[in-house]
Image (cartoon, rainbow, N blue to C red):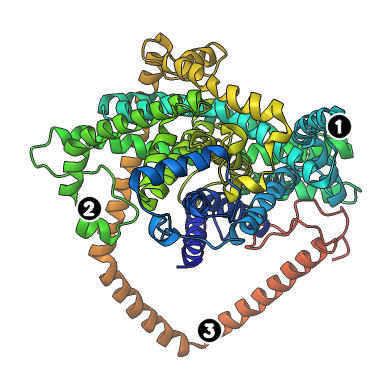
Amino acid sequence: MSGAALSVVVVVVFFLAVYLLQRYADVRKQQRMVLLGTLLSWFLCFLIVFILPLDVSTTIYNQCVHDNSNSTFPLSQATKFNQTKASSTHHRPLSVPKACERPWSYIPDGVLPVFWRVVYWTSQFLTWLLLPFMQSYARSGAFSRVGKVKTALIENAIYYGTYLLIFISLLIYVAAHPKWKLTWTELQTIGIAAANTWGLFLLVLLLGYGLVEIPRSYWLSSSHGYLLAKTYFKAAKLATEKAAAEENLADVMEEVAGIHESVRYNHSLRKCVDTILTKCPTEYQEEMGGNVESSRREHTAAPTKQGLINLHKRVIVAVQRRGQTWVQWSILLDRAFHLEDVAKSQSSPLRVFTRSFPLGHNCWIRRFVYTPAVEWYWECVLRQGFCRLLALLLCLLSAAVVWSECTFFSTRPVLSLFAVFIHTAEKQYNYIFIEMACFVSILFMCVCVYSTVFGIRVFNYYYLVPHHQTDAYSLQFTAMLFCRLTPPLCLNFLGLIHMDSAISHQDRIQTSYTSIMGSMRLLPVISDGFYIYYPMLVLLLCFATFYNLGSRCLNLLGFHQYITDDDLTSDLVDEGKELIRRERRKRQKAEDGENRRWAWRERYGVQAAWGRSRAGYTQLKDDQNCPVNEIKNSVSRRDGNHDEQQESLLQDNSSEDGLPNRRSGGRYLTLSPPPTGLFDDV
């Protein structure tokens, strides 16, 4: 098993990242660079979460070998005393094969340091340089590559500025100390400390919200009435956002139409205008292409290059926002219809789950395993108890995280619950329990942090939507966020289990993950101050979240949150209920019309097809025997060829400029009007 576990985990994590990317992103339509950057970022972050438990178990085995060896490594006085006490208690000689059991997932020496170094520095390059640059480059309104690069650098100055500010502060602190000399290793340590400080600052804020909100959300989701009322509330809010997005897009498209008419065909900025037109939705393109003469008189002022750049960016943002709201609205409608179907099925004596609208996909699982009867028992009987049991387990896990975050600095006695569990399993050489405990704990903390980002209303601009509906900007945002928060989160977890000697100050072998971070003892203000006392802030954040202080503050600022004892919440719930009722009637009418058309095709389709084939055969026979029809056909063919030649001539003359807004499908070749008098001699 030497290195086999590492290889298996790497392969499994890669396919997991590919599956998630295929689920959330449209692989066929997204840009290749966006897909590659997102896949690589997710893959590296998942590797950290999955490989770190193996690193912990390997380090525990190496520590056991170190403690039981005679003179391979120098031992501290405390370690020698513990070995003497253990030998006097058990009265047996120390031998490596008998005392230390090798874990099934043991990774050979020298593999993990290189592995962690590649994973960490690649993820940092992606999150601080490449992904922010790609995101700003894609959203830039400039028309040239140099302009897009310049805009991307300016927009990312705030990210680079915060990082450089922390780095320069730590650099001055180290340079001013008389005992330390700046070397390349120490500069790497300062850079890593700056990145971890930035990540830990945001990590604690997000973790304090998620540790309370996730268990509470599962407990409240056991109540069907609560879920339905909250869905109505979200529908009312999202309907307002959707209307605002449509209105904003209409205003931007009106301005684009004015620019389209004011910039003539031979203008120097015409190519820029045509580039903007290609970013507009199809219905607006057709409308602007059909109303050329009607709106030409209203707009006469020619725009500037900077004005077109700003308009280009506004078009990109408006189209993106409209698409996001429509996708969220479709998903929310399906959720509301499903909850209303559950409410109807609960009172049904048939004990069969009945849907108002059939699903678009009917896989073999729903046909043979998750049948309507099984779905009824799950939705109406078992789901409530399962959600409450899961909420209790998550509540206990949240309490353990909060307690450990406030007490992990105490090594004698050991107060951190995670450290107690790991040390107990270490004495029994239960490596499987150690790895599972580490994996579940890290995964739970990651879920608390990342769900907070996409759950708070302020961050709803970036939204992960399944069924291939996530846009490129949300994918890049999640990739950046994962790479920035996962390394400090894992380093914080190693402090909770007392595997980071810079925080616990114990004479133990460090994990390979900690070794690539450098010795944080170089910066006592970080290792002995910020890393220890700042995580205690999570307790205050948990109390604030428990009493909904953050939601009430956001509600006062205009970001309406679901608060049960608020009058505005009840009004929005009633409004959302009416909106869902209208959408249900609209979808029901469309469904009934489709059923009638299907029944008509099933009833009369075969007879009509047979009648058409019979009539076509008779007409063909008559045409062959009638010379008049031959003359008519030849004339019509001649006229058709003449029309095709005229149409091709018009197309060739209208496309001679080679503008970038050519569309396939026959809608239009250019949106700019042709010069007057071009065909006067025809």
Which one is nearer the viewer's eye here, 51 or 289?
51
In the image, residue 637 sits, relative to residue 394, either above or below, namely below
Quadrant occupied by the C terminus: bottom right
Work out whether 553 lies above or below 642.
above
Q: Amino acid at mark 2?
A: Tyr
Q: CA distance from mark 2 to mark 3?
A: 66 Å
Marks 2 and 1: which is nearer the front?
Answer: 1
Please tell me which residue is depicted at 34% across the width and 56% down the height of the picture: 361
Numbered marks: total = 3
- The residue singled out by tag 3 in the image is 628
Residue at figure coordinates x 85%, y 29% from the top left: 172
Disc 3 marks a residue whose amino acid type is Val
Q: Is residue 8 above or below residue 640?
A: above
Label 2 or label 3, whichever lies nearer to me, is 2
For mark 3, does the 10 Å Cα neighbourhood hold few (<14), some (14 to 19), or many (20 or more) residues? few
Q: Which residue is mark 1?
A: 175
**Horizontal relation, residue 10 to residue 92: left or right:** right
What residue is drawn where x is 31% and y is 47%?
A: 591
**Mark whose residue sits in front, 3 or 1:** 1
* Residue 306 coordinates in the image, percent (x, y): 87, 37
| Crowd band around label 2 with a 10 angstrom C-alpha radius: few (<14), some (14–19), many (20+) | some
**Up-down: is 559 above or below 643?**
above
Q: Nearer the viewer, residue 17 or 61?
A: 61
Amino acid type, callout 1: Ala
Q: Quadrant of residue 176?
A: top right
- Tell me which label, 2 or 3, sits earlier in the chain: 2
Query: In the rendered image, which residue does mark 2 sit on?
Result: 370
Give the left or right position of residue 388, taking residue 484 as reference: left
